[in-house]
Amino acid sequence: MAQEDVFKRLVSHCKEYGFVFPSSEIYDGLGAVYDYGQYGVELKNNIKKYWWDSMVLLNENVVGLDSAIFMHPTIWKASGHVDAFNDPLIDNKDSKKRYRADVLIEDYLGKIEEKINKEVEKAAKRFGEAFDEAQFRSTNARVLEHQAKWDEVHARYSKAMNESDFEDLRQLILDCEIVCPISGTRNWTEVRQFNLMFSTEMGSTSDGAMKVYLRPETAQGIFVNFLNVQKTGRMKIPFGIAQIGKAFRNEIVARQFIFRMREFEQMEMQFFVRPGEELEWFKKWKATRLKWHKALGLGEEKYRYHDHEKLAHYANAATDIEFEMPFGFKEVEGIHSRTDFDLSSHEKFSGKKIQYFDPELNKSYTPYVIETSIGVDRMFLSVMAGSYDEEKLENGETRVVLKLPAALAPIKLAVLPLVKKDGLPEKAREIVDMLKFDFKCQYDEKDSIGKRYRRQDAIGTPYCITVDHQTLQDQCVTIRFRDTMEQERVSIESLQGIIAEKVSMKTLFKKLSE
Ligand code: ATP
């Protein structure tokens, strides 16, 4: 199946099974805003718990914080968001559609890369074992031609972006003959800067009201509380502060479902270190975070790093962890070495000293920061995309199954009486009552057992427990495993142990500590 179709099916599956709904749907929705349904919220909470505990439970020197969405507006001056949190936008006059100029050019560059890769693939097939890719790339005429084009466009693009030269950015779009995918024309407007922050007013009278922003990232709440946490928690450097919370960005082009939203959630951790030690810590967190992703078992090959060549002026290293979504490898998490930019800037703008006295070195300094920043919603999408499967069964039927990591699954087990009589429902309820304190259970007695299994497969429930007449005599049930569909007869007594081993987050945390 084409990847585009897989993605469409995934989106409709999310809706049909109560994971994600478009916001305000009965009013025809609101662009790039989504609600999480009954199973979505459980999955999302489990993702957040996996992240939170991996930070504050497994690291003695990482503590949590929950700062407000509204913050003093000067914070966004200090952070650079008022002046520089902009996207260059361009409109097509015929379709009236708005695009990010940088994205149009990056897509164009991506197409050239695709062409090169196709040439390489073709040649690899032709030459077989003897194929020398590096040599081919450096000598093949067609590849060299594409590469030269790529280099030229990329150089111009980087220069225009770095120098905020929007005229040339537009000219580049024209020179590359990039057309609007809707109208097919090259009738473009000027490129304009567009600030991504939402603003509103705080206070009751119009002249006394203060313009405030909805935070576009959670990180600044951590920076401005650095001293509060460090002093009250008697924290010694190196230490980290972790936070989960909503962030808002007025994205120009909101596409790809919950990949790019206007209201979303972030999980960020700022790790404060001694100046000079930041690159060592950057390396460490980079490896730790990838391990966290891979421990879920969605497939090692689905992840890759994308190291940034072009760094923001305050960063001295940055990388993304990308996941292979149905629409290609995309950023899920960013890891940045942000130097002392934020703390110094807040010191300057607030006029308050923000320094740390290091008793070992016997001196004060502004700590450097490594940040790990991941979007809950993008993580949710990667987990769903990595778990969604349409399996052809031996009997010719297709089974839609979400092979969610058991620890993240919204429902851990379903208890199903084979029939709705003869005391089986009562026995099934007894089992639910016994297990409900440990696991999120579901009781289901409607429809045939086969249909009930399918329903649980579709929401990713790792275990189905079937109660039959025999159960009343031997206190045993059938446990069915979601991924293999194998069934086993086990005692009711043993259920807790069997299930706990697989669904507990402890199993994941142990992998992280290995
Ligand atoms: P992009 O380049 O895709 O716009 P970004 O580099 O601006 O992302 P960061 O500012 O580094 O993103 O934010 C950290 C994380 O927050 C991202 O890795 C992503 O998971 C998440 N995130 C950022 N913007 C959005 C959004 N509009 N919708 C959902 N998640 C987002």
Image (spheres, rainbow, N blue to C red):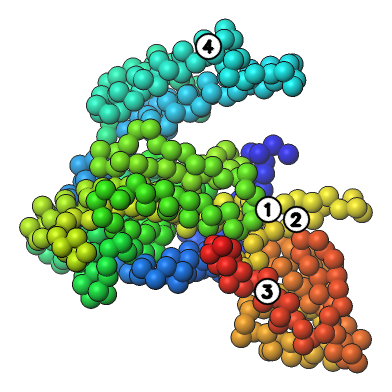
Name the kind of residue labelled 3 in the image.
Glu
The answer to whether the residues at label 3 and label 1 have Cβ atoms under 8 Å apart is no
Disc sitting over residue 144 in the figure: 4
Name the kind of residue labelled 4 in the image.
Leu
Residue 510 spot, x, y in % from top left: 57, 67
Q: Earlier in the sequence, mark 3 or mark 4?
A: 4
Residue 468 spot, x, y in % from top left: 88, 83
Mark 1 CB near ligand 1 (8 Å cut): no
Is disc 1 placed on a helix, strand or loop?
strand
The answer to whether the residues at label 2 and label 3 have Cβ atoms under 8 Å apart is no
> Dot 3 corresponds to which residue?
501
Residue at (62%, 48%) from the top-left corner? 300
Task: State which quadrant residue 201 falls in.
Answer: bottom left
> Dot 1 corresponds to which residue?
388
Residue at (32%, 36%) from the top-left corner? 311
State the CA–CA distance, disc 2 to disc 4. Answer: 45 Å
